[in-house]
């Protein structure tokens, strides 16, 4: 399909304004949020304006592996996927609804990071807008980030409640009407994209042993199980985990391999670990090890 120009001169002028720093993109699935965000990012870099991206799309993230909310400072006009962002928060889910508390905690943490940045910040979000909870999440995301500009990508009038919420506030919003006919990703394609990103993240791997008695432990999901002890007694092979430093910062995503006595074997990317592993977050998001680690020996 031929590219439809949605990045208008008017929008270029608005985003170039000095007082417009935090810009958030909101719209349903496949409305072109990420494509427009990348176009704007390239435009800003060409104008030599320092730009960072926060990717809150835990399902289809291009900054950070799936299940994370991530921040990266962009250095180059050519980019596709950033497996290893500058900062990330592990939500343990591939939809915001899977872990709403964790999702909003991640947003709050990112806000802290963004506040320290001097350049422009482009914030990508999920296309999840279809029910009241989804709209409420978007509204709370806006409340937390307090963006200077909200770019709304709308097909019909599906964002009317958000527009109503934004009316009469000092932050600006800009509506782009999306014509029919944008290509739509099927659930299968979305799932394949996600798997590809996990695969890229784990393209070179190693195994680390973590003594469970010597790290802080956090568990996400496993709704019907009461104690951490009980969860640790389950077969956790394939559970996506995060390794943390002693400041409760997520530093590396891994996959639980097996428990040996009091120790957990976790598969992580083969990179130098530049922190002391002080925390382990175990989620109930499971991946198929054979699928994720298939190309680990120089396949691609
Ligand atoms: N301006 C455009 N003209 C034509 N096609 C476009 C345009 N922008 C995006 N597309 C296409 O529409 C599809 C969806 O785009 P994109 O992934 O940017 O949307 P999104 O809103 O970020 O989706 P998601 O809901 O997955 O986050 C893609 O196939 C993309 O190539
Ligand atoms: Mg997107």
Image (cartoon, rainbow, N blue to C red):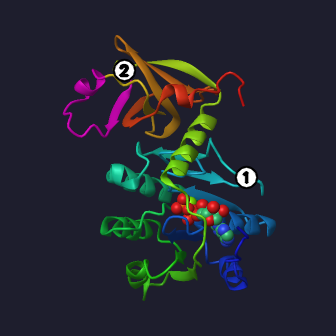
Distance of label 1 from label 2 (alpha carbons): 38 Å
The quarter of the picture where residue 135 lies is: bottom left
* Residue 4 position within the rendered picture, expressed as x and y whole percent measured from the top left: 70, 75
Q: Earlier in the sequence, mark 1 or mark 2?
A: 1
Q: Residues within 10 Å of mark 2 (few under 14, many from 20)?
A: some
Do the residues bearing badges 1 and 2 touch, measured as CB atoms within 8 Å? no
Regarding residue 20, the answer to whether it shows in the image is yes
- Indicate whether 35 appears above or below 67: below
If the picture is divided into quarters, which one holds ligand 2?
Answer: bottom right
- Indicate whether 195 appears above or below 142: above
Q: Residues within 10 Å of mark 1 (few under 14, many from 20)?
A: few
Residue at image location 51% in from the left, 78% down from the top: 155
Residue at image location 61% in from the left, 76% down from the top: 20
Start-end of magenta stretch: 214-234
* Residue 11 position within the rendered picture, expressed as x and y whole percent measured from the top left: 66, 81
Q: Quadrant of the N terminus?
A: bottom right
Q: Mark 1 points at which residue?
A: 79
The quarter of the picture where residue 151 lies is: bottom right
Q: Mark 2 points at which residue?
A: 212
């Amino acid at each position: 399909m031929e590219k439809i120009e949605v990045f208008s001169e008017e929008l270029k002028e608005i985003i170039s304004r000095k007082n417009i720093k935090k810009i958030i993109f909101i719209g349903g699935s496949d409305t072109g949020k990420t494509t427009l965000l990348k176009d704007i990012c390239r435009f800003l870099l060409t104008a030599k304006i320092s730009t960072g991206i926060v990717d809150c799309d835990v399902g289809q993230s291009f900054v950070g592996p799936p299940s994370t909310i991530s921040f990266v400072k962009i250095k180059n006009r050519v980019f596709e996927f950033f497996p290893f962002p500058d900062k990330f928060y592990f939500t343990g889910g591939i939809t915001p609804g899977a872990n709403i508390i964790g999702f909003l905690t991640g947003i709050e943490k990112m806000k802290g990071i963004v506040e320290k940045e001097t350049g422009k910040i482009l914030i990508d979000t999920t296309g999840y807008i279809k029910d009241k909870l989804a709209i409420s999440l978007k509204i709370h995301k806006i409340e937390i980030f307090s963006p200077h500009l909200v770019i709304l990508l709308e097909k019909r009038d599906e964002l009317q409640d958000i527009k109503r919420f934004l009316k009469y506030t000092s932050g600006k919003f800009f509506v782009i009407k999306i014509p029919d006919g944008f290509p739509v990703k099927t659930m299968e394609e979305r799932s394949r994209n996600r798997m590809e990103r996990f695969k890229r993240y784990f393209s070179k791997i190693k195994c680390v042993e973590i003594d469970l008695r010597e790290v802080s432990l956090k568990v996400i999901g496993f709704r019907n199980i009461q104690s951490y002890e009980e969860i640790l007694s389950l077969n956790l092979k394939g559970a996506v985990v995060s390794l943390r430093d002693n400041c409760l910062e997520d530093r590396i995503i891994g996959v639980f391999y097996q428990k040996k006595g009091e120790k957990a074997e976790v598969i992580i990317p083969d990179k130098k670990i530049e922190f002391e592993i002080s925390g382990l977050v175990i989620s109930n998001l499971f991946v198929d090890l054979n699928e994720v680690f298939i190309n680990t020996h120089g396949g691609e």
